[in-house]
Image: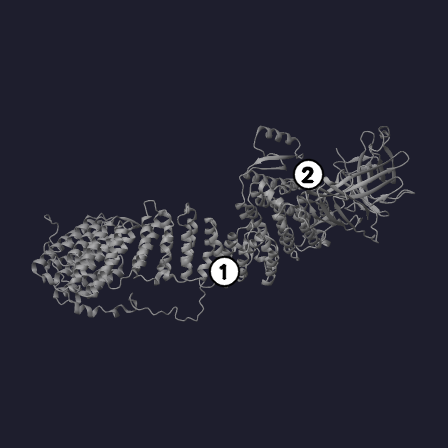
Amino acid sequence: MTINLDIVLKRTNKVYHEGDTISGVITIETPMDAKHEGITMTIEGAVDLQISNQNVGAFDAFYNSIKPVQLMMCTLDVARPGRFTSGITEIPFEAPVEPLFNKTLYESYHGVFINIQYLLKAVIKRNFLNKDIHKTLEFVVENRPSLDTLVTKVDNFVINQNTLANINDISDIPKFLILGTIDSVICSITQPFTGELKIEHSDVPIKSIDIQLVRVETCGCAEGFSKDATEIQNIQIAEGNVSTGISIPIYMIFPRLFSCSTTKTTNFKIEFEVNVSVIFINDHLVTENFPITVYR
Amino acid sequence: MSSRTFEWNWYSKPIINYNKRKKNCVLEKCGDHHPLKLTSTTVFTNKNVLIDDPLSSSITYGDDPLSRPAQLTPTAFDDADNDWLDDLPPWSHYKQSILNSYTTSEKLSFHSLSKNVQSATIRSRLEELEEFDDQVEYSEKELYDLTQQEFVSHMDNLGKEIIHAWSNEQRVKALKIVIQCTKILSYTSPMQFYPSKFVLVTDLLDLFGELVFKRLKSKSEIIDGHVVKLPDNFTPNMVPEGAKETCQNWFFKIASIRELLPRLYIEAAILRSYRFINPNEQNNALLRLIKMVRGIGNPLVALYARCYLCRIYVSTNLTVNYFEESFKDILLTYKQLNSRYVSKEVQTQNMSMEKFFQLLCPALEWIVKGLSAGKDALKLDEIVRWCTLQNLHGLLINTIVNTFPGNYLAIKAEYLINLISKWEYDVVPQTLVIQNLGNSLRGHIVPNAQNVLREAWKMVTKVKDSERYMACAEAWIYFIVKHFKNKEISIFMNDITRHLSNRVGIERFHSQLHNILQHLLNYIEDFENTFHLNYLLPYLDMFGSDTNKAASCKIVLEAYRTRGENVMSTDPVINDCLMYMCKILHDSVDSLTVEDEVRQISRLIACFIFRVNYGNDLEKYLNFYMEARGVFIRLDYVQSALIQCVNKLMVMSVSASRVLVKNSFARACSAYCYITIPSITSPLVKLQLYILTGQTSLLNGCLGQADACLKAASITVRDFPALLEIDGHTINTEPILVSYIKQMLSILLVVPDCPDQEVMHQVRILINSIRQYSWTDPMQPHLLYLYVLDMMATATLDTYPYRIPDVDSNDVLYGREPQFVADVDSMCTILLDNILEQLKNIADKPSCQKQLAFELLIRIIVRADLNEIQMATLAINLWKLTRKNKIIDSIIEDNKVSYIIDFCENEDDDIYYKFINKITRNHIDSVQK
């Protein structure tokens, strides 16, 4: 005898903003009548922080889990103890999306060291002979899109053998010249990251040109402080020895769960960077880094 | 003859009262029903009346039921309704030709998500078992050393796997498979196979795009649990949020694919699905994708990617012309093709640059075709100008020559030729472009053709490679035949001959030489003079072996047959030339040649023989026919045609003059025929020809020859087969034979007896033949005897009803000598005995008996002398016999009776009146009964 518990939200995309009301139905499907001790629904949001063991000592790593910061907590009694008749039972619920006192709701985000997650948890309590039935559903919280678009900031860049840092002998390096433009380093998360790039000249054939989206997560608090840059995604924009003198478009869509608006709080920071890397046929790599600001 | 069953002796009627009879046998008697009467053509007199003849009404293009299936053949892009795209050939045509022409024998290796492709070793069997445990887990692995066939079937399997995964709710897996497939396109090795690889992979992509679109559509059609059909031209606001979300997710998923090529191809594949979110995004996305292709370094890969995008564009029915965008990018990156990195890569694959360029052609041609479709000349001019601005623009010009509309190219031909002639270092050989230009100009009028040809040929003649040369020649023959007269054609043909003679391996070019010849003869304006030109025989000499030569001779003769009515057939040079070709053609026939082929060849040769014309010089004709007989000994049809011709000659010699000298010529002709006929196998033709020759010999007074021919004919009759196969049908020969025998009888009447032989010896021979022939119908010989009776009775008359001028028949020779009449009558008596015997034998078949009796009765009344008491008694007896049996067909019966009565009434002798009285009484009696 199995009871299936499911949460269905009214919004199919599961995206909510602060102040919205989250509503939906809990569906219970049971092949025969079943007793229960009540159904509760918890809505919670929290920031989980972790300190990577690269930045702290091995001992500290022991404590690397920092206490999560709770942003939202709300419990609903959906149903009193009773019976389910066989078949499908649907119980609607509704709750406000509101932060706890003195807290703000950050955008949902899944990173390596920082996770901002909002969950709906439904529980059917059963008597001591049966296990409780749990169901968890994540929903997404986003900032309201800002109506006044921020100023765009064009970034023109030039990469050649002279602009390179951390090299030993400049004479070893073959000559090349790459020109490019980033349409804006202040980017709307809903819009693609665009720009273009032109190989003016290269002595060594090019193997590949990639656009790398990097998150920079900073966890800072009393116990420790860490800053880590990890790759989110890598988009190849050129393969093989591309023709010179022609603009190659740079185009990247921000991934939905793994990116959010640039967030800076007292406890943690989520920032993003874009790397344009050119890989030559001899596997030498040239990277240009662009810190970007993401907004919604 | 010693033991006679019946005592009836035949007595022929001494005279037939023709004058009196003729008076009565006039047409009016038949009234309106005379079969030979002039029929007034009332049916089709009124031309203005619209007759609804289904065959004559012109078939409009769309209505023709035969052309419809071709239109309905599903093509990949038949939903595009932009007007100008109609002249764009559907991709499916290209697809097949690409698959056919770009193949490889090399082994293919690539990474793939799949299970069981490697050769069925135990290892892979084990792996299969393992995979059975966790089917979802598809690991990436490398596939080595697949042959082309294995690769194709592997792609097929992947297609099935995609569908399977899709229908099992494992859509991400399907996507993974598609991504893996698309990655294959980044590996160009082996290059030769790349275009085919492209076709195979894009088929999978199309499939995937279709799956996504259908799935989204079906998702959109379920609103609150109800199915609402989405119209074909739906807009995003008809689409529920859920479906939009799914669609958006697909695009997000694809946007995060790391590799450029899969990201680009797959987004293009599902581009159509943007319609669920925002149709305008299709335009933006396609434009972006076209730009993205710039990031592909390998020109081969990039070009095919562009081709795919253009295909997607055609299928999505967008308004902006993306062909132009793509083509501009191609021009921008064109220099890449000639860069040293590319040539180095091509070299590592052991391929020449020229071959490499050929790999690019299908994609480039398709794009340029799309680009030029529906454009006016000005726009096309601009495209040409863009292309010429590039360095080493050979590939581009070649593509233009292959794809632009012919009428445009015709106008530009001179310009293009001049352009081509300036190339020096281009990878694309000049001759290739010239060859393609020649093909494209086919059927178009080119201004300044003289210059075009001169410049083009200047380049072509420089080429050492015979294959190139021949390809050009084959392509340009259309142009030359259309624009030039015999002089230039002659120069051109001589050039070909000069170029190819003394080359080793000329066999390679035979099919091309055939084509050139065929086209030349079919379309040359001045056909009559073709045979005057002396290029033809040297040209034919290039077909070394006999079979090839025969085939080309056949082409020439075929053309001669259809177009050569006005060729001067008196010219000995032409005749010799044709004779030479006929001889070759004839010599190619052997026992293995199929029947139909033999017939065709025979007709061609016969056609030539019929057309030969020596005016009034009959001797010359005969000499020619003599020669022809020797040469075309293997073909019956030709032999019989020759005999017909000689017979015609004989008739001509009669009409020409009546001098005795001609007689010797006629004798020669007759001898010719008599000698030739036995070599023919078909007994029917033999019989016909013997009879014919007999007649014509008779006409010329060659009595001995006529005698021989008719004797031979009689012998042929005896040995005639019962069944004969004519044109594949087996027919019963008996009715034919009967009619020929009747014809012979009427001829034999006028054939004079040979003084050395007994009386009517020809007839005797024929009767013997009839007797010896194994008839299937036992009645048949007796019915024939009746006709013989007719003829013999007539032979006793003192003047025959017809005669041949200047030939004395038996009537003159014997002058109704009593001994002659007695001899003939005795022969008749024997026949009569035979018939009476038969009458007795068939007593158990009353209807047959009655028929025969009636026929005999008529013969006796008409032919025999009833004054002889024997004859009269026999007639009465026969009459009684006919009365004895029941009347079966009373109308015929009555007609016959009334004929007899009518005949008798016209006779002067009393006996006939008595006879009438006798039978009318009987007749009335029987009717009254």
Which quadrant of the figure has residue A6? top right
- Callout 2: chain: A
Callout 2, which amino acid? Asn
**Element at badge 2?**
loop
Q: Quadrant of the C terminus of chain B?
A: bottom left
Q: What is the x, y in percent for residue B732?
A: 29, 50
Height in image: A54 above or below A272?
above
Marks 2 and 1 sit apart, C-alpha to C-alpha, by 52 Å
- The residue carrying mark 2 is A282
**B408 or B564, nearer to the observer:** B408
**Element at badge 1?**
helix
Residue B452 has which mark?
1
Say if residue B928 shows up in the picture: no
Q: What is the x, y in percent for residue B93?
A: 55, 51
**B910 or B323, nearer to the observer:** B323
The colour scheme is one colour
**B728 or A248, nearer to the observer:** A248
Callout 1, which amino acid? Val
Q: Is the residue under label 1 in contact with that under label 2 (CB below 8 Å)?
A: no
Height in image: B386 above or below A52?
below
Horizontally, is B363 left or right of A269 in the view?
left
Say if residue A244 shows up in the picture: yes
Q: What is the x, y in percent for residue A245?
A: 68, 50
